[in-house]
Image: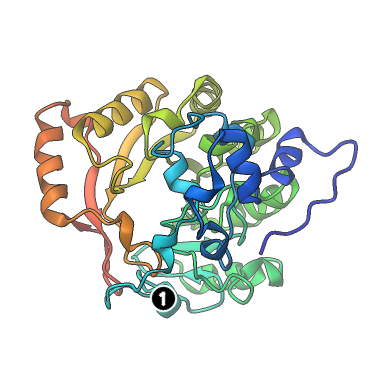
Amino acid sequence: MIPLIALQEDTPDWQKQLARAITDPNELFAHLRLDPNAWPETLAAGHSFKLKVTHSYLHRIEPGNPKDPLLLQVLPQGAELAPQPPEYDTDPVGDIDAMPHPGIVHKYRGRILLIATGSCAIHCRYCFRRHFPYASAHPARHHWQTTIDYLQAHPDIDEVILSGGDPLVLSDAKLGELIARLQSLPQLRRLRLHSRLPIVLPDRITPQLLALLSQTRLRCILVVHCNHANEIDDAVREALLRLHAAGVLLLNQSVLLKHINDQVDSLAALSLKLFDAQVQPYYLHLLDRVSGAAHFAVSPDRARTLQTALSGRLPGYLLPRFVYEVAGGTAKTPL
Ligand code: SF4
């Protein structure tokens, strides 16, 4: 699933960091001074969706703390192997049925989502695409031509969303080629990227990337994915400020996760810290019911309680919209 990156002398530093991401649980345990015997099922749980975490993210996890909210997002655990409730499956938001061509997801009016790559810099255990068939659903195989043809056949589409995987895993050359193809279509007005890289690998925000995003004629929106205030350290904040200074509109989407951010203090701290980094809280998703992630679910009743408490704590512009996605729906559903 993860392409090998040939490391040359001139390989950008962020790509070297990406290649050095930790995939061995014992290395993770050693770094964090945790006892591997406390997690006997980690190896098995990470078999089909393996552990992956950048050193940058790792450094924000508190050593010796088995309940660290960042650790819990990346550590494969035995609960992933437990029998799942019947409503949990491998394609919880209906991506497969919404693909007119491999890798082109067309659910909502006026916009399509491209699976630009199958790779990520980190593997989030609750990921709704953890079972996604990336090998066969990948429009880049055809040099984006299928995507261009599809857009030309649908002139009402004025926004493309680059997703994945994580689109910022693509090299600047590949990303630049794709953006050039897209901006040549007069119908397109906005380019949105859904990426966790500014959070988990802030060195990805290079001057070259900023030039790409600021020089396109398309209005650029970057939706980052951050679930906890501890994920935003100085390097992340500075990367986000660089993006903002380059004219990129920054939004954040989070997932409401049990034992990670399901407290009003935690959600309020996240919104405040995002705003300090020029990021607008956008969506707080209830967990998509993907097989292997049921232990992260927060009940709708608990979510409503948090929503009420948060609205009593923060000004309206810092409140994310609490939503969930229904497969086959034409928009996100407000809680
Ligand atoms: S970065 Fe996004 S796509 Fe990748 S594993 Fe995490 S949630 Fe899934």
**Left or right of 178, for residue 334:** left
Q: Can you say which quadrant of the picture contains the C terminus?
A: bottom left
- Mark 1, secondary structure of its residue: helix
Q: Position of residue 253 (x, y in %)?
A: 36, 44
- Label tally: 1
Left or right position of 44 against 1: left
Q: Position of residue 154 (x, y in %)?
A: 46, 71
Q: Is residue 192 visible?
A: no
Give the labeled residue for mark 1. 98
- Residue 29, percent from left and from top: 58, 41
The residue shown at (73%, 42%) is: 20
Against 165, residue 202 (above or below) is: above
Residue 292, image quadrant:
bottom left
290 on left or right of 309: right
* Residue at x 16%, y 48% (from the top left corner): 303
Residue at position x 56%, y 23% from top? 235
Residue 68 to residue 102: above or below: above
Q: Residue furthest right?
A: 9
